[in-house]
Image (cartoon, rainbow, N blue to C red):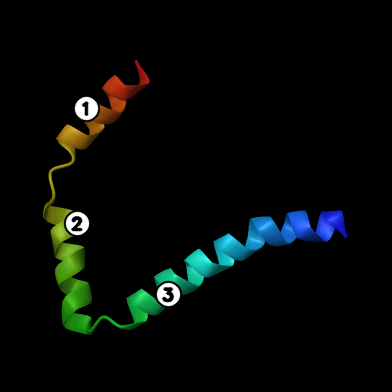
Amino acid sequence: MSKAIKILKLFFPLALGVFLCWYTYSQFSEEQLSEIKQKFLQADYFLYWLIGFLWIF
């Protein structure tokens, strides 16, 4: 029984997260999805790369 509980503790949060991502994604219209895609493509990620690099060191 202990092994089943460990597996459930691992997979339940993952399954819940995947479900919530899918549900949120399914609520977007095609126009909203294309706008989100454009925003990600236009974003300047230099600052985030720099902060991430400095965080390691």
Q: Which amino acid does label 2 sit on?
A: Phe
Alpha carbons under labels 2 and 1: distance apart: 18 Å
Locate residue 24 relative to residue 39 in the image: left or right.
right
| Residue behind mark 2 | 40
**Amino acid tagged 3:** Trp
Q: Which mark is residue 22?
A: 3
Q: In which quarter of the image is the N terminus?
A: bottom right
Q: Which residue lies furthest to the right in this view?
A: 1
Tell me where residue 31 appears, x and y as whole percent.
Answer: 16, 81
Residue 39's x, y, as percent?
Answer: 14, 60
Residue 41 relative to residue 3: left or right:
left
Q: Earlier in the sequence, mark 2 or mark 1?
A: 2
Task: Name the mark nearer the viewer: 3 or 2.
Answer: 3
Instruction: Check the image and report above or below for 41 versus 53.
Output: below
Distance from label 1 to label 3 (Cα)? 31 Å
Point out the residue furthest to the top here: 57
Residue 49 position in % (x across, y down)? 24, 32
- According to the picture, the residue beneath numbered tag 1 turns out to be 50
Q: In which quarter of the image is the C terminus?
A: top left
Q: Residue at x 22, y 74 (%)?
A: 33
How many marks overall? 3
N-term-proximal mark, 3 vs 2? 3
Given contact means CB atoms under 8 Å apart, are the residues at marks 2 and 1 in contact? no
